[in-house]
Image (cartoon, rainbow, N blue to C red):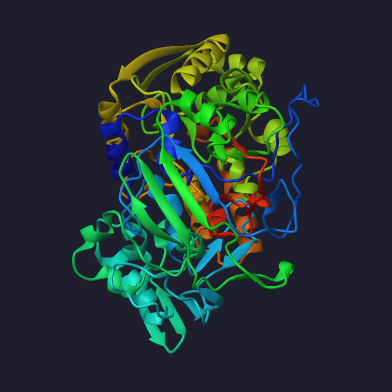
């Protein structure tokens, strides 16, 4: 991940809405949640019901199942954001969702089902010690025909090494901060790549699974990189054949793609022949195009709109972003744990769910719920760790002689429905007899103040976090980036140690337990960082599109067994 300031700087300049922010990340900010899928609401009936997905614990869920599959057809989608750069290591907008379809990842570990890993360029991997990852590459991963002069050869270990070397040394890449900090060396021995890390890092495979970590042929990483603004060549299921910025991108299937569907007699994948990606900023035009069968996918404005479309397969996918209330514990009154607890008890997250998102959200704990089993259960949060208790909140306010919050927030943004969160939060504090002195700031000024810790408390936007790493680091003495920026924890050595344990434990089950224990310890000391809720994003699909993989977050980008019925 690049630094948070770099991320916000880009989007401050663009002044995007929440929806465009989500889609600008190529749906990377929308990942499937703890298998909550949809099309059903309290008033579900024959007119609005959507097909029920097949649910699987060991892989993706399947929406709109059907068969036997047929090959062919063009899958058309519309996005309300620009493509951005098609360079697989620097692009951050819609193009980034297509990097795993043009190139290969070593592996893709699901952020929502972390026990599911899609093996792509690597056919296996092992960790012989806490600092070593050994990837055995798959034979037969062959580069697509292209106009860039790259031979239609098999991908090899030197391609992997060239990618890591670029990520480690090129500060313009999205994964520079990760690779430069954690990757010590990369060595090649035949079809094996060995990566040595600088320290034990629990989230290494999660980082390698990012769409920004795809492996292009090494020839593309030499010479004039601007040629990748609208071209590409890789071993993924599709190849980019044309792109017009702010218009249309076209892909055709890679005839050399290695993967087959063993459940269908070993048929070569992908089934769909062509992908067409349109940029359409106007929502009404997007909806009309979808309902008239001109496109096969529609990002609904809300779950209510999606359910009203009538009988379409709908994926109800959690969003990994959220708003939080952030306190600076070095400033009064937040150095007093009773103040922090009073605010926590005054927050009724169900109101945010109902009033801001009409039920299409869930309450967050310190680790947001889209991260599946890493998050504490809703029952634990509601009954023990962050109960809404207005009576206790008022008692604590009285005990400390009253509470006034000097609260900064970005005044000119619609990202994450910030204004609606603001009104609900202020009202809830008032009910607990907590005064809020609102201090609105222009967006860039707020980002600067937030970065520099020049605030007492803030109603803060948060980026897309697909592991518990940064949410936990928010509570540590040195903050999420180790440099005392954005937020600082309680300065508690026990919390620092617990978070360090969670972020350095490689075994999945032990790491999950450590993540839980760190959260419980932080709650015991009254946290200074309180996430509210993470919403769902409802995505409607054409009834013609069959076997849609869902429930595994951005890992779905690498999966190609969906097909189009005639």
Compared across the picture, whether 291 is left or right of 247 comes to right
Left or right: 179, with 369 as reference point: left
Can the viewer see residue 495? yes
Asked whether, in this view, residue 270 is left or right of residue 105, the answer is right
**x 56%, y 22%: residue:** 342
Q: Residue furthest bottom?
A: 190
The reply, left or right, for residue 63 in relation to residue 93 is right
Residue placed most toward the observer, 444 or 198: 444
User: Given the current orientation, which residue lies at the most extreme left position?
Assistant: 224
Q: Is 33 rendered above or below residue 86?
A: above
* 392 to 123, vertically: above or below: above
Depth check: 392 or 408 in front?
Answer: 408
Residue 47: x, y in percent?
Answer: 76, 25
Q: Position of residue 61 (x, y in %)?
A: 70, 51
Q: Is residue 186 above or below residue 516?
A: below
- Residue 348 coordinates in the image, percent (x, y): 62, 21
Judge whether residue 477 can be spotted in this image: no
């Amino acid at each position: 991940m690049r630094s948070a300031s770099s991320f916000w700087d880009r989007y401050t300049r663009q002044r995007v809405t929440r929806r465009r922010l989500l889609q600008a990340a190529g749906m990377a900010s929308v990942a499937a949640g703890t298998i909550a899928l949809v099309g059903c609401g309290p008033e579900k009936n024959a007119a609005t019901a959507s097909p029920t997905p097949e649910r699987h614990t060991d892989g993706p869920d399947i929406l709109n199942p059907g068969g036997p599959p047929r090959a062919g057809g063009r899958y058309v989608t519309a996005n309300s954001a620009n493509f951005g750069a098609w360079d697989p290591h620097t692009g951050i907008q819609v193009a980034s969702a297509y990097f795993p379809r043009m190139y290969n990842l070593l592996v893709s570990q699901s952020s929502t089902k972390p026990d599911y890993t899609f093996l792509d360029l690597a056919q296996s991997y092992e960790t012989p010690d806490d600092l070593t990852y050994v990837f055995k590459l798959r034979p037969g991963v062959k580069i697509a025909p292209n106009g860039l002069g790259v031979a239609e050869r098999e991908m090899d270990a030197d391609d992997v090494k060239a990618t890591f070397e670029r990520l480690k040394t090129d500060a313009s890449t999205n994964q520079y901060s990760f690779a430069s900090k954690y990757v010590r060396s990369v060595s090649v021995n035949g079809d094996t790549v060995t990566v040595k890390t600088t320290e034990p890092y629990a989230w290494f495979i999660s980082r390698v699974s990012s769409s920004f970590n795809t492996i292009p042929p090494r020839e593309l990483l030499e010479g004039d990189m601007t040629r990748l603004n609208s071209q590409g060549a890789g071993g993924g299921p599709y190849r980019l054949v044309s792109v017009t910025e702010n218009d249309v991108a076209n892909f055709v299937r890679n005839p050399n793609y290695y993967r087959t569907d063993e459940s269908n007699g070993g048929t070569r994948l992908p089934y769909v022949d062509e992908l067409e990606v349109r940029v359409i900023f106007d929502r009404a035009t997007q909806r009309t195009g979808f309902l008239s069968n001109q496109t096969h996918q529609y990002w609904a404005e809300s779950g209510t709109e999606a359910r009203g479309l009538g009988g379409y397969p709908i994926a109800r996918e959690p969003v990994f972003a959220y708003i939080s209330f952030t306190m600076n514990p070095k400033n009064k009154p937040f150095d007093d744990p009773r103040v922090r607890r009073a605010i926590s008890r005054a927050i009724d997250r169900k109101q945010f769910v109902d009033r801001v998102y009409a039920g299409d959200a869930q309450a967050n704990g310190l680790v947001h719920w889209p991260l599946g089993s890493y998050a504490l259960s809703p029952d634990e949060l509601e009954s023990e760790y962050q109960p809404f208790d207005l009576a206790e909140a008022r008692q604590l306010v009285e005990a400390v002689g009253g509470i006034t919050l000097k609260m900064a927030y970005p005044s000119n943004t619609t990202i994450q429905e910030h204004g609606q969160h603001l009104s609900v939060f202020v009202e809830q504090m008032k009910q607990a007899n907590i005064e809020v002195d609102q201090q609105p700031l222009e967006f860039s000024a707020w980002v600067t103040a937030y970065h520099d810790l020049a605030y007492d408390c803030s109603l803060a936007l948060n980026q897309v976090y697909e592991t518990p790493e940064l949410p936990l680091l928010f509570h540590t003495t040195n903050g999420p980036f180790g440099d005392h920026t954005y937020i600082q924890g309680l300065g508690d050595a026990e919390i620092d140690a617990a978070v360090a344990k969670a972020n350095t434990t490689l075994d999945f089950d032990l790491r999950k337990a450590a993540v839980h224990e760190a959260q419980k310890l932080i709650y015991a000391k009254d946290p200074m960082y309180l996430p509210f809720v993470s919403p769902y994003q409802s995505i409607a699909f054409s009834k013609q599109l069959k076997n849609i993989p869902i429930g595994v977050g951005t890992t779905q980008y690498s999966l190609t067994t969906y097909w189009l019925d005639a």
